[in-house]
Image (cartoon, rainbow, N blue to C red):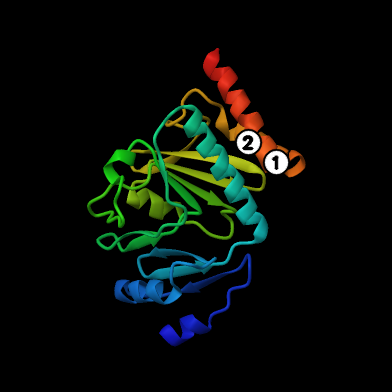
Amino acid sequence: MLLNIKRIDVPPGQRVLLRDVTWQEFEIILDELGEHRAARIAYDRGVLEIMAPLPEHEFGKEIISDLIKALLEELDIEFLSLGSTTFKNQKMLQGIEPDQCFYIQNESKVRGKNKLDLEKDPPPDLALEIDVTSRTNPRIYESLKVPELWRFEKGKLQINVLRNGSYVESEQSTIFTNFPLSETIIQYLELSKTAGRNSAIRAFRRLLQERLQS
């Protein structure tokens, strides 16, 4: 299997599914793929998915991530962003790499840790997925008990909140209760395409500051 993994060339925007992959094989494959790669993985009870994102996928991920960071900074909330860190739980036989993720409420519990073990440590408070038609299994995030999953697809941002073990689409984030983010984030993402990234982030910060002052 390892030789086949090394030979796999996943074109941007495409995915490869491998079935009947044991947990031990999954761990070995992760080592073979290495950390510095564009491809993302998802593992669900023996099924391994490898996906290579499109360039526009990366653009959306970076801008939305920067807007979330700006929001957290303006609110003066400590956070830890871990990008596409591999989160896995052997007992559940599941693992996934979000496009971006944040520790917010649980930031202090993982602060300074070089490695995370979801059998002991809390999951990220917020996971972000881009272009979910090409990848993403919400069931994995539900099993790992990630409180919020934001899914950006076809120009829309969907906020999913974990309730009683399942995701429910919500108009508001439980983390940022006073902000209509599903529309505002997209507004400034679109602005970045015409005004530039820095101008869009500055305008977003001004909006936040005005709302906080009022």
What amino acid is at disc 2? Answer: Ile
Mark 2–mark 1 contact, CB under 8 Å? yes
Q: State whether residue 213 is above or below residue 158.
A: above
- In the picture, measured across the screen, residue 48 lies left or right of residue 184, that is left
Q: CA distance from mark 2 to mark 1?
A: 8 Å
> Where residue 203 appears, x then y in whole percent?
66, 30
Q: Residue furthest right?
A: 194
Q: Is residue 189 visible in this depiction of the protein? A: yes
Mark 2, residue position: 201
> Where residue 213 appears, x then y in whole percent?
54, 14
- In the picture, measured across the screen, residue 190 lies left or right of residue 92, that is right
Camera-side residue: 78 or 100? Answer: 78
Camera-side residue: 195 or 18? Answer: 195
- In the picture, measured across the screen, residue 9 lies left or right of residue 102, that is right
The image quadrant where one finds the N terminus is bottom left
> Where residue 106 appears, x then y in whole percent?
32, 39
Q: Which mark is residue 192?
A: 1
| SS state under label 2 | helix
